[in-house]
Amino acid sequence: MTNCNKAKFITFEGMDGSGKTTIVKMLEEYIEKNMDKSAFMFTREPGGRKSKEAEKIRAIILDSENKLSSMVEALLFVASRRINLEENIWPALNANKIVISDRYYHSSLIYQGVLGGVGIGKVRDLNMMVTENTKPDLVIFFDLKPEISLERISKNRASFDRMESTDISYYQKLHNGYNNLISYEPEKFVVVDASKTINEVFEDVLTIFKNKVF
């Protein structure tokens, strides 16, 4: 792969409890120690780290006391996503930086479109309008069997946010939804076995980045 074909916008998706966010943090630390960090921009969803307004929306979405319909969730997510694009992602891409995001619109397709019952087509159309068809070059998916996902979540969480569940069927549906997305865009996704140790998973991700990003 030549440099001009290297991925510039990379998103991380994964099963709940897959260690995805921990790996993103490890990757950021690796880049800070070994590379020019100013050439990279790290962000997350919902929120965006650097956007006060998007982070306020994140708090509303994740607050377990809030009773929101899946459609309202989808609208809040795209509002937060649009703010993050305008304030962070688009400026970084225009400055030729490499953007790395912990989740992006594929999460909405699954969590609101499939699990929430809004419909994947409706959620996709909504996101394509709001993002102006800004798609990632590479999606790294952290794969985990549903039963392991539930086991890890139950073990590591003192409490659950609004986007999590203790029902195994929820994780089976989550897993199937992502597998269907991957089958539609196999050239965009790279699947990582998240059942390995955190250090093994990080080495796998680092290899992907050395081949497709750095």
Image (cartoon, rainbow, N blue to C red):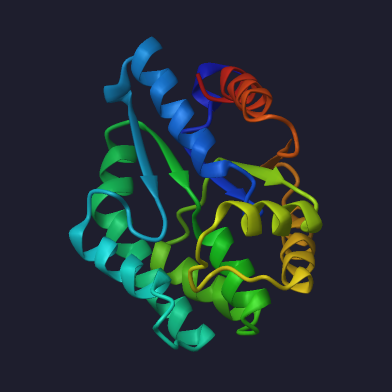
Q: How many marks?
A: 0
Q: Residue at x 54, y 67 (%)?
A: 108
Q: Looking at the picture, tell me which residue is in the foreground, 154 or 4.
A: 154
Q: Looking at the picture, tell me which residue is in the foreground, 131 or 35.
A: 35
Q: Is residue 74 visible?
A: yes
Considering only vertical position in the picture, is 68 above or below 135? below
Q: Is residue 188 visible?
A: no
Q: Residue at x 40, y 82 (%)?
A: 65
Residue 174 position, x and y percent, is 71, 65
Quick one: which residue is furthest to the left in this view?
52
Q: Looking at the picture, tell me which residue is in the foreground, 73 or 181.
A: 73
Residue 152 position, x and y percent, is 67, 51
Considering only vertical position in the picture, is 28 above or below 91? above
Considering only vertical position in the picture, is 120 above or below 198? below
Considering only vertical position in the picture, is 40 above or below 210? below
Q: Residue at x 23, y 49 (%)?
A: 50
Q: Is residue 22 left or right of residue 146?
A: left
* Quadrant in which the N terminus is drawn: top right
Residue 85, picture quadrant: bottom left
Q: Is residue 20 left or right of residue 166?
A: left
Residue 121, picture quadrant: bottom right
Residue 47 position, x and y percent, is 33, 58
Q: Residue at x 47, y 28 (%)?
A: 26
Residue 57 position, x and y percent, is 30, 70
